[in-house]
Structures are given as C-alpha cells and as structure tokens.
Image (cartoon, rainbow, N blue to C red):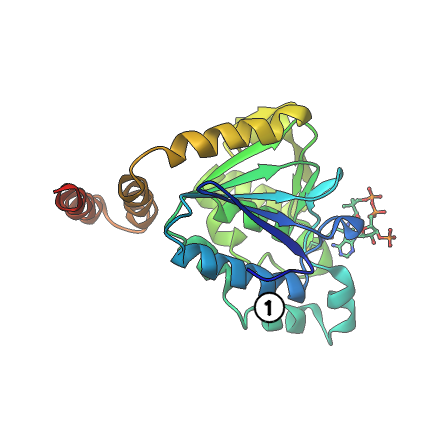
Amino acid sequence: MGNFDTLIFEKIDSIAYITLNRPKVLNAYNMRMRDELYQVLAAIREDTEVRVAVLKGAGDKAFCAGADLTEFLTAPSPTVARQVRWERDVWGLFLSCPRPLIAALHGYVLGSGIEIALCCDIRIASDDVQFGLPEVALGIIPAAGATQTLPRVVGTAKALEMMFLGGRIGANEALNIGLVNDVVSKNRLYPAVDDMARRISQFNPVAVASIKQAVIRGLDLSLSKGLALEKILSGTIVYSKS
Ligand code: COA
C-alpha cells in the first residue's frame, strides 16, 4: 500500500497496525487523515490475510487530540467543517469492519480520538490516558458516532455526563465505567495489545468474524432476532469447516 502523510500502515504476520502519525499536533484528525484512514480501512476489509487490526497514536503525548482545530477555524463554521467530514463515511467503514479492531490508547484521547476508539471492539489504555469529548465547549455535538457509540459502551447517564460537561476522565474512571477493557503501565501498552492481537489471530477467522457480527449486529436487534442471527451464523461456520 502507498505511503501516507498522516498514517503509518504496517502488516506483521496477520496483524495490521495503523498508527495515527501527526505527533507534532497530537495526531489531530484532519481531512487528509480521513482520506487515508478510508483507504486503509477499505484495504483491510478486502485483505483476507489480516485477522486483527490495531490502532495507535504516534508520539508520547496522545492517541489523538480530536479534530484538527485549524481546519475547523478556516471553515465557514464548525458545522460546515463537520459536513465536509461526512463526505467520506470513514465511521461507517470502521463500524462495519468484519475483523476485530483493538485500540491502544495513551495520553490525550479527545473528540474524534475517543470516537475512533469507540469504533474499535477492544480498548486497552495506558495509565496516563485522558479521555474527553470537548465538542460542547465549541458549540457543536460529537458527530463521528459518539452520541450513539458511547452510551452503548458506558451507559446513557455516564455518556451524557461526559458530553454535557466536556471534561476529561483518567484511566481509573475509564476502567470503572467500562470505557476500556484494561489499563496497563505505559511501557506495557504495546506488548499487551500485541499479545491480545496475536491470541485472537490464532483462532478460526470465520469464527472470530461471526462472533463480532453476532454481537455487534445483535445489539441493534430484539433478543429473538439476535438469537436467529446467531443460529444462522453458527450454521455457516459448520458449513465452512466441511
Ligand atoms: N487540532 C490542531 N492542533 C492541535 C490540536 C487539535 N485538536 N490539539 C493540539 N494541537 C497542537 C497544538 O496547537 C500545539 O501546536 P504548536 O506546538 O504548533 O503550538 C501542539 O498540538 C501541542 O499541543 P499543546 O496544546 O501545546 O499541548 P498541551 O499538552 O499544552 O495541551 C491539549 C494538550 C490536548 C489539552 C490541548 O492541545 C488541547 O486542548 N487541544 C484541543 C483539543 C480539542 O478541543 N479537540 C477538538 C475536539 S472537537
């Protein structure tokens, strides 16, 4: 795959690593990053060699400090800036990715940063992590999915508190409310994520993808429809083994 300005894309064995790579501006999410993420996610979707994808942020200070505010400020309004971002449905690609996505989170994870993390299936954080949705202070709402994804992960009350106040929460609180699966020391972050990715990648990829599909699609279904989906997927796996 080509060279990118805002990302590093690597494939090691069957694991894809996507690193948000604008460390001088704390990996702020700009249009270029949107386009490059779109390209990488579309490629991962097609690449059957990839069994798990890991997202991380370059530099010491942040996974991602949110939307690039310089683009926001040059657009006619934050709302227009948002509108332009929707022209490519990166978030739809994230959420429909059939393979497991693991976010390795350190430092600032703000705005679009937390929204990227929420599109992942598993979130592992280092103990210096700071999560927040500062949009309300800019007079806008989170619009890369967080109004829907955050309550599904941490519950309505906590999600609304985070969005109404725009404040930040640290590693312990994130773990307590279920925003992250685990917290590790900073030097253990990438080894811990690698270990998890490798363990998942050893299993039958059809089984892993079917588990993801059953759980994620099932969340939008009634229990009886979810159970019917589980039955169909389970039958597909038996068929694929014979
Ligand atoms: N967009 C564009 N540039 C950003 C950015 C963003 N969202 N977040 C940080 N940067 C840039 C800073 O402008 C600074 O650039 P400079 O060195 O050219 O001055 C560089 O990244 C380092 O950030 P700095 O503010 O100096 O680091 P800090 O440790 O003092 O503060 C934050 C870190 C995250 C608290 C602070 O940068 C911040 O509040 N950023 C904006 C967060 C935000 O509102 N995001 C948008 C959500 S919708």
Say if residue 162 shows up in the picture.
Answer: yes
Please tell me which residue is depicted at 55% across the width and 69% down the height of the picture.
86
Percent coordinates x, y for residue 38 in the rendering: 53, 63
Percent coordinates x, y for residue 177 in the rendering: 52, 31
Q: Number of callouts in the render?
A: 1
Percent coordinates x, y for residue 129 in the rendering: 67, 34
37 with respect to 22 (left or right): left
Res. 31 image quadrant: bottom right
Q: Residue furthest bottom?
A: 76
Q: Is residue 112 above or below residue 107?
A: below
Q: Is residue 224 above or below residue 174?
A: below
The three-letter code of the residue at mark 1 reads Arg
Camera-side residue of 81 and 96: 96
117 with respect to 130 (left or right): left
Res. 160 image quadrant: top right
Please tell me which residue is depicted at 16% across the width and 47% down the height of the picture.
236
Camera-side residue of 199 and 162: 199
Q: Quadrant of the N terminus?
A: bottom right
Please tell me which residue is depicted at 60% across the width and 68% down the height of the picture.
85
Camera-side residue of 119 and 83: 119
Q: Residues within 10 Å of mark 1 (few under 14, many from 20)?
A: some
Secondary structure beneath dot 1 equals helix
Say if residue 155 shows up in the picture.
Answer: no
Percent coordinates x, y for residue 89 in the rendering: 50, 66
Q: Is residue 242 above or below residue 197?
A: below
Q: Quadrant of the C terminus?
A: top left
Please tell me which residue is depicted at 66% across the width and 36% down the height of the picture.
106
Q: Is the shortest distance between ligand 1 and the CB of mark 1 under 8 Å?
A: no
39 with respect to 3 (left or right): left
Q: Which residue is mark 1?
A: 85
Q: Is residue 12 above or below residue 137?
A: above
